[in-house]
Amino acid sequence: MANGYFQADLRSDASYIVLHPATEGGQPIRFDELERYLISNKLTEYKKIDLKEACDKVEAEGKPAMVRVGGALPYKIREEMLIFLSEDKMRLTARFYPPCVKGETMDPDEMIRQIQANGIKYGIDNAAIKDYVTNRRFCTDLIFAKGKPPVAGHDAKIEYFFNTNTSLKPAMNEDGTVDYKNLDNISHVTEDQLLARITPEDPGIPGMDLFANLIRPPQVKGRKLNTGNNIRMSEDGLEIYSTVMGHASLVGGQVFVSDIYEIPADVDNSTGDIKYSGTVHVKGNVKTGFTIDTQGDIIVDGVVEGATLKAGGQIVLKRGVQGMQKAYLESGSNLIAKFIEGASVISGGYIETESIMHSNVVAKTEINVTGKKGFVTGGRIQAGSKLCAKKIGSPMGAHTVVEVGMSHETKQRYNELKTELMSLQKELSKAYPILQTFMAKIKEGEKLPPKNMLYLKQLAAQTKDMEGKIKARKQEYELLEAEMALNVGASVEVQGIIYPGVEINIANCRTLTESERNYCKFTVVDGDIKCSNL
């Protein structure tokens, strides 16, 4: 395969250009290139249309042709090399035009000198130049110099060998019930178990352009294995292991291992209240009046009665809570229970249960009341994004309130700000008239006693402070108000029946169900709560 090219034939009476066709799929002669060559060599005595037709004919017939392009020249035309540099300065391309018939060719040294004269200091391909000299190819792009591209490295990577996904939910049994016995979201570990391994960052390999400028690879990020108690690190600092049997968790990028405090029977008079830094696993029940307070998880195999449970991690009740309106449960993460009855519950993640009866239940994200029963009856249920249940309310009219669309903490902060703003504005409205009275007296030229001047300065400072507080709190209040108004994605999903008399609040909208509805979904549409079929 060879591109079409042209060659000057300089005779004593005139100058001609010989047009050679492309072969075996090569590119035809580029007419603009031919014209540039003729003009640069002062061969301009031709008709453009005739020359163009000759080029087309050469390619069509596949035979060379000769066209007169000027008078006799007093010199011979040497072989010509044009060089082109890529924008990224990583590739130099050479393109050759043949010497006239019986003209001189360029040697490799001359080619290299011309390349170097353009400032090229790196990557000249001597082998490519030598290959061209032994096999000349005209009007063809040939790469005579290449830079060295940088080799990208990679960020440091950490591989964890325990479950770090706290959003995992219990699996469903074949009969439609929820499996609360086999839970994979508690990461039990044994002594000397590998917890994590880090692959250090690779900075990569720098490159170099044709001007010998260093090209640095993209910057990479390093990482460290951040650990807490009960963990040892390997000598090379690349692996960490548990030093105890316990429970592993990943919190804010840091690995924690808390040893498990196992209570073989009930939490009652025989144990007293439990306060522990790790995970607490109760094999029996938690009796009324007792407290478990831990920074880790709480796992209870039996029933929680009217007790208090506070966990920095998850709370898992493999049976449930029968609180008799005395139980209080608070988890920093998810809360999973077979049933919730007569209890106050606050979860920093999601809540998963088969039934909620006469309880005040709050979840930062969502509440799923699933399984065969899947009912919510009585009490107040608050979820940050979604409540999903089979039955809500009761045919007996138990007062049931459902709220979604804003987390409990956010709503609490919203109400606090509202109260604070009212109080500050009330105080400010009292201060302004006093300030105005004093300022009017000063403008009239009245000289105030030192005692009054001191009071005036103090009042002015207090007023400025109140104005600053009002401004800051108003901004936060308006942001939360906008969040309430825009939270249209929140929903109440009924996978069975919702009874009349259920109060539904989504963001800042409210409605009361007036009749039974089946398989439906409540969302905010155009500022109102609408019910649609599932």
Image (spheres, rainbow, N blue to C red):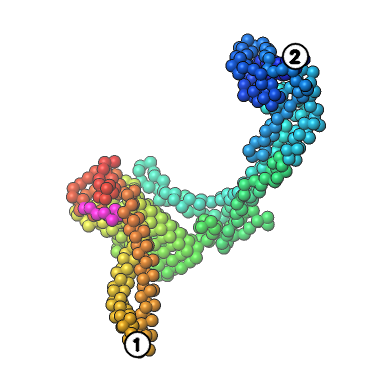
- Amino acid under disc 2: Asp
- State the residue at coordinates (33%, 81%): 443
Residue closest to the eye, 389 or 220: 220
Q: Quadrant of residue 67?
A: top right
The residue located at (46%, 68%) in the rendering is 275
Answer left or right for 492 relative to 39. left
The numbered disc on residue 394 is none
Ranked by sequence position, the earlier of labels 2 and 1 is: 2
Q: Which label is found at residue 447?
A: 1
Give the secondary structure at mark 2. Answer: loop
Checking the image for residue 13, the label placed there is: 2
Q: Looking at the rendering, in which quadrant would you find the N terminus?
A: top right
Magenta stretch, main secondary structure class: strand
Q: Is residue 138 above or below residue 308?
A: above
Residue 175 point in image, percent of width and height: 35, 42
Q: Amino acid at mark 1?
A: Lys
10 Å crowding of disc 1: few (<14), some (14-19), many (20+): few
Q: CA distance from mark 2 to mark 1?
A: 115 Å
Q: Nearer the viewer, mark 2 or mark 1?
A: 2
Under tag 1, what secondary structure? loop
Residue 443 drawn in magenta: no
Q: What residue is at 62 percent from the left and 14 percent from the top?
A: 54
> Which quadrant: the C terminus?
top left
